[in-house]
Image (cartoon, grey):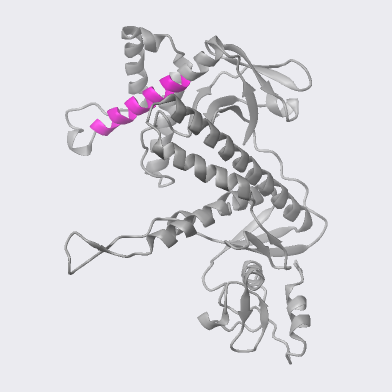
């Protein structure tokens, strides 16, 4: 678990040292990645295998030869090699993709502070000891006992904002609520989160004015010359807007997940391969015209991908799992299955918001109906159709009521 705090380096020498550490960490990481790409199974008979230990020995020799590299911190540079080794470990364990080079103008830059030393100035401010930079001030927004329990830290620069992530032991989960209610959660685009009791939550975005300003700045950036001072100022303005949006969405995620975790003892969430769902549309070659391509709906798919990512599906499920017991269920046919009788067909869903069962005539909001199916699958609840339809509104409300989990 990481505790993220805002860092306020002093303009001048201290800020220059932090930027230097970011540059050295990126350079060592990229150089180590290129060195590892030399070793292949076909060359293993005549070339020594490259490991994190051999690369650290090479780093020691490089620091003897190059003054600019020796001016940095060996702790920061060795931390970059450890990050690279961890990236390859995750790749071979099939937890992530092949490591890629870090860009100089990437959205996020950072380095590791391994030997963590912090001290408190007052109730609102603390300091962290950074190699070559001395004591760097940061804002204290968490309990100081949690900060003191940290074993290492990572200082990062993202969109012009400096932060420090303090690695701490996982925090104990909050006490489970006294209720035995369970809930199903459906994630969508029109409604970012829909629960089985009929509640809808919407992830925030830009306001109308912010969206217009963001688009105008992007168009201005496209016209400006790369490397110019005006382009740099435009990128800074875009970064501030992105930071504002990220803070807004992060606050929404924390408040929504905390509200759900305090109201239910467990939740069921559908499994969604978000990375696959947000891939770009595949090109369609034209068989009659070699080298040409047919329309593939790429523009509409790009818009859908942006909407999915803006709904924060992955981060929402991750933070919800941190706060309560979450059950993952298959997502197949949850939006086409009737929560009243179990009849499944594509025609059941008239539109994005309307669900009308072709078997029993049951009507409900489509997202709420899907959330009820997710809840029933997650907690093995059987469909219990009514003897007679009667008042469909009354049945809809009765079916959407929270279910009590029986031990």
Percent across and percent down for residue 73 are 46, 13
Q: In the displayed structure, would residue 212 be above or below residue 68?
A: below
Work out which residue is located at the far right of the displayed protein and give it.
178
In the displayed structure image, the side of residue 77 where residue 10 appears, left or right: right
User: Residue 85: image x %, image y %?
Assistant: 40, 31
Please name whichever residue, 224 or 141, is drawn nearer the observer in this view of the structure. 224
Image: magenta residue range: 21-38
How many badges with numbers are in the image? Answer: 0
> How far across and how far down the image is residue 59, in percent?
35, 17
Query: Residue 34 colored magenta?
Result: yes
Q: Is 209 left, or right, of 175 in this rendering?
A: left
Q: In the picture, which quadrant includes the C terminus?
A: bottom right
Judge whether 75 appears above or below 362 on screen: above
Q: Is residue 61 visible?
A: yes
Q: Nearer the viewer, residue 120 or 60?
A: 120
In this rendering, does residue 205 appear at all? no
> Does residue 401 sit above or below 102 in this rendering?
below
Residue 25: image quadrant is top left
Residue at image coords 19%, 68%: 287
- Looking at the image, the residue that sits furthest to the bottom is 388
Q: Position of residue 286 (x, y in %)?
A: 22, 66
Q: Main secondary structure of the magenta part?
A: helix
Q: Residue at x 58, y 84 (%)?
A: 343
Give the quarter of the figure containing the N terminus.
top right
On the rendered structure, is 65 left or right of 335? Answer: left
Taking the magenta stretch, the answer to whether it contains residue 225 is no
Name the residue located 72 percent from the left edge and 68 percent from the top edge.
198
Residue 406 is drawn in which quadrant? bottom right
Question: At x 50% / y 39%, what residue is drawn?
Answer: 217
């Amino acid at each position: 678990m990481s505790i993220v705090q805002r860092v306020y380096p002093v303009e001048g020498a201290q800020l220059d040292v932090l930027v230097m550490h970011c540059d050295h960490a990126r350079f060592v990481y990229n150089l180590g990645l290129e060195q590892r790409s030399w070793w292949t199974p076909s060359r293993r008979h005549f070339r020594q295998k490259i490991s994190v230990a051999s690369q650290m020995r090479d780093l020691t020799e490089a620091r003897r030869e190059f003054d600019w590299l020796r001016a940095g911190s060996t702790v920061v540079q060795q931390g970059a090699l450890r990050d690279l080794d961890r990236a390859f470990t995750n790749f071979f364990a099939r937890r992530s993709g092949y490591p890629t080079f870090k860009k100089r103008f990437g959205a996020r830059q950072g380095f590791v502070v391994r030997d963590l030393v912090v001290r408190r100035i007052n109730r609102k401010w603390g300091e962290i000891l950074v190699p070559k930079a001395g004591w760097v001030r940061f804002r204290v927004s968490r309990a100081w006992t949690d900060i003191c329990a940290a074993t290492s830290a990572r200082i990062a620069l993202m969109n012009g904002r400096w932060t420090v992530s303090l690695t701490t032991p996982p925090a104990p989960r909050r006490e489970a609520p006294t209720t035995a209610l369970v809930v199903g959660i459906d994630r969508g685009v029109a409604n970012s989160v829909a629960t089985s009791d009929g509640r809808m939550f919407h992830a925030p975005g830009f306001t109308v004015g912010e969206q217009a300003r963001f688009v105008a700045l992007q168009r201005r950036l496209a016209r400006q010359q790369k490397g110019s001072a005006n382009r740099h100022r435009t990128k800074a303005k875009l970064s501030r807007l992105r930071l504002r949006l990220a803070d807004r969405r992060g606050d929404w995620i924390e408040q929504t997940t905390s509200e759900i975790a305090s109201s239910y003892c467990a939740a069921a969430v559908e499994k969604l391969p978000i990375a696959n769902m947000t891939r770009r549309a595949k090109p369609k070659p034209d068989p009659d015209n070699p080298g040409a391509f047919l329309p593939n709906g790429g523009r509409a798919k790009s818009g859908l991908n942006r909407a999915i990512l803006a709904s924060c599906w992955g981060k929402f499920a991750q933070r919800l799992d941190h706060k309560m017991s979450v059950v993952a269920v298959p997502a197949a046919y949850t939006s086409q299955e009737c929560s009243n009788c179990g009849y499944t067909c594509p025609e059941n869903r008239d539109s994005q918001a309307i669900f009308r069962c072709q078997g029993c005539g049951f009507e409900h909001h489509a997202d709420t109906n899907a959330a009820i199916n997710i809840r029933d699958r997650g907690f093995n609840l059987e469909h219990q159709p009514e003897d007679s339809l009667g008042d469909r509104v009354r049945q809809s409300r009765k079916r959407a009521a929270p279910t009590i989990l029986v031990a």
